[in-house]
Amino acid sequence: EADIYQTPRYLVIGTGKKITLECSQTMGHDKMYWYQQDPGMELHLIHYSYGVNSTEKGDLSSESTVSRIRTEHFPLTLESARPSHTSQYLCASQGAGDTQYFGPGTRLTVL
Amino acid sequence: QKEVEQDPGPLSVPEGAIVSLNCTYSNSAFQYFMWYRQYSRKGPELLMYTYSSGNKEDGRFTAQVDKSSKYISLFIRDSQPSDSATYLCAMKSVGNSGGSNYKLTFGKGTLLTVNP
């Protein structure tokens, strides 16, 4: 079983708040990813990192930002949350092989 | 046209049935194909991974790839209630260096319910 963790699992906040979604993995994987998943829709890649101090935007435009200061940690930040940010956010990591290991996700609701 | 098309279902079958899940794709650069299983309120987990055309079997699961038709399938034999989940196909292309490109393109997922 993959050791990748996301906190919080569920978050309900008001519009305009700044939030940070945490993602940590203990496998020493270089590559990490953030996906957005809405019901009945594809997972969309919003950010990825191939190593420390490396971050790139994904295929889906997002107002969030990420950082990769440590190998094991890849937090995602929304400076000012809006109802349109309501979604499930999934973090994944990948080592030398081709398998991406997913965390349990954070379900975000912005009122 | 979306790069990956997957019928979202929902699909409901009786226990013991053979289940067929399918995806089509339009990007001929896709060379690596995966099936992920996602239980409710969990993250996806890799179920099957294949590169070449043909069949790959793992227990009750068989992944089939037909690159000429740009069509992949996942078959589940003797389906069980524990197989109830959303099944996502995913694929990726070859990278510039010849190895795999890391970014995955997913289908929408098919919600499967196996009734006891």
Image (tube, rainbow, N blue to C red):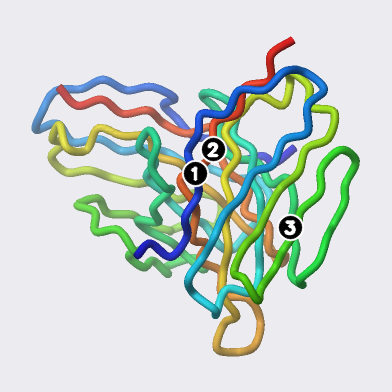
Q: Residues within 10 Å of mark 3 (few under 14, many from 20)?
A: some
Q: In percent of the image, x 25 and y 32: which residue is there?
A: A86
Tag 2–tag 1 contact (CB < 8 Å): yes
To the question of a shared chain for discs 1 and 3, the answer is yes
Along the line of sight, which residue is nearer the eye, B69 or A7? B69
* Residue matched to label 2: B110
Q: Please, is residue A53 above or below residue A91 in the view?
A: below
Along the line of sight, which residue is nearer the eye, B47 or B68? B68
Where is residue A5, by image quadrant?
A: top right
Residue A74 screen position, x and y as percent: 45, 50
Q: Please tell me which of labels 1 and 3 falls first in the chain.
A: 1
* Mark 1 and mark 3: Cα distance apart in space: 20 Å
* Mark 2 and mark 3: Cα distance apart in space: 17 Å
- Residue mark closest to the camera, 2 vs 1: 1
Can residue A28 be seen by looking at this rendering? no
Residue A24 screen position, x and y as percent: 53, 43
Tag 2–tag 3 contact (CB < 8 Å): no
Q: Residue furthest left?
A: A16
Q: Please, is residue B26 above or below residue A28 in the view?
A: below
* Residue matched to label 3: B49
* Residue matched to label 1: B7
To the question of a shared chain for discs 2 and 3, the answer is yes
Chain ID at mark 2: B
Tag 3: amino acid? Tyr
Q: Please tell me which of labels 2 and 1 falls first in the chain.
A: 1
Chain ID at mark 3: B
Q: In percent of the image, x 72 and y 64: which residue is there?
A: B65
Where disc 3 sits, the SS reads strand
